[in-house]
Image (tube, rainbow, N blue to C red):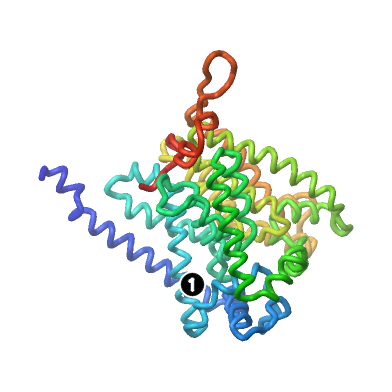
Amino acid sequence: MSVAGRRHGWPARLPLAATAAGCAAALGLIGFLIARGVPGSMVDLNVYRSGALTVLHGGDLYTMRTSIGLQFTYPPLAAIAALPLLLIPFGAAKAVWVAMIYLPLGVAVWFGFRPLLARAAAYAPAVFALVLGGSAMLLPLRQEIYLGQIDIFLVGLCLLDCSVQRPRWPRGLLIGLATAIKLVPGVFIVYLLITGRRRAAGVAALSFAAWTAAGFLVAPHDSARYWTSTVFDSNRLGGNAVAGNQSLRGIVLRAFEPAGAPALAWLILAALVAVAGFAAARGCWRRGEDLSGVVITGLLAAALSPVAWIHHFCWVVLAIGVILGAGRSWRRVTAALLTFALFASMLPIWAQSGLNTGRLPVLPARLAEDSFGLAALVLIGILYQLARTAGRPASTSGGTGSTSGPAAEPAEQPADQPSGSGALAAE
């Protein structure tokens, strides 16, 4: 082996790998200590665990309340999937959950920061550890750890289903599972459809139906109640107009306070954003920037949901990575750093406090309260613009304007195997 080969081979990388592993372990420990030591921590994990306990004993899932009065608001499958949490004490479950959160976060970092990791070469393990640590400092991820939530797991499922080039499972299977656990990932079925992956969209729909049917088999009464009434009751989620709700509906509700917002205002705004957003996602895919399309769809999932708490915006990790790229452009680096700074702050919460105490003028306070939701819309535009300038343009033939790019290629094969630099496929 040459000197260069020895320098960049595994013997040289072992210290870096050990450093990366040590940093990841330290982050997990810090996250656990924070989550364990702060009053009110892991309250949502307790909701999942209490829901599982209710299902196990045949109780009524949607009248159940935790010791602090929280209700179960998710499809029955979420409670059924939480049954393994009952095998260990709650304190141990907290530690396991924090460690598990870093697994899908690592998947998001691997896909989102792939160009930067490739540029780092032999130093990639250390860079990966630093990015993983930085990502965990974003407020959506801090809330994931503090509350014991599942959103980053859903990000991982949808990301793998869309971006792995040759999955070992039927494409769409994981999206269906994610949607059956928490309805918001259902927007990815739309993304599969508009990018020509009809077979995968069908698999996702069938997967959702199958997992939902499994919920009916295990908890028929709870399933019937959820799908006929509970699913339509957003008030079970708490105050929808608080700054923690960064969806378009939350923004509209706050804009009309103290009066009630007309439902039509939100519906019109959501329809406009959906049309523009899905068009941007499809445009990214057509230019070979499939990851950008996936991230846009993830941001749309939060924006279009009736209620999107701050921890629903875990997709910002991937948005930062895509914007940063290989880190060679100062404009992209600046945009990525500004995005990180905003989402690492508690600006919406601070603004709400300042408005309630009269320390901030109404208009600036409202804009700051809505900052994460508005930033998500801006990020959609940035990702689309980057795809236009950096992606592979759709080719034309015959002067008719018809494309011969991904959308015009036959059947399911090319759509299920997106090409171009944006696919960032995992072999």
Query: In the figure, 17 relative to 25: above or below?
Result: above
The residue at the point 50 percent across, 22 percent down is 395
Where residue 236 sits in the image (x, y, percent)?
75, 69
Which of the pair 293/368 is nearer the observer? 293
Disc 1 designates what residue?
97
Query: In the figure, 179 relative to 123: above or below?
Result: below
Q: Hey, what amino acid is under mark 1?
A: Trp
Local SS, label 1: helix
The residue at the point 60 percent across, 62 percent down is 180
Query: In the figure, 393 relative to 104: above or below?
Result: above
Q: Quadrant of the N terminus?
A: top left
Which of the pair 396/144 is nearer the observer? 396
Where residue 44 sits in the image (x, y, percent)?
61, 73
The residue at the point 42 percent across, 50 percent down is 167
Q: Quadrant of residue 74?
A: bottom right
Where residue 155 sits in the image (x, y, percent)?
53, 56
**Could you tell me if residue 338 is visible in this image?**
no
Where residue 403 sits in the image (x, y, percent)?
55, 24
Query: In the figure, 63 relative to 75: above or below?
Result: below
Name the residue furthest top: 399
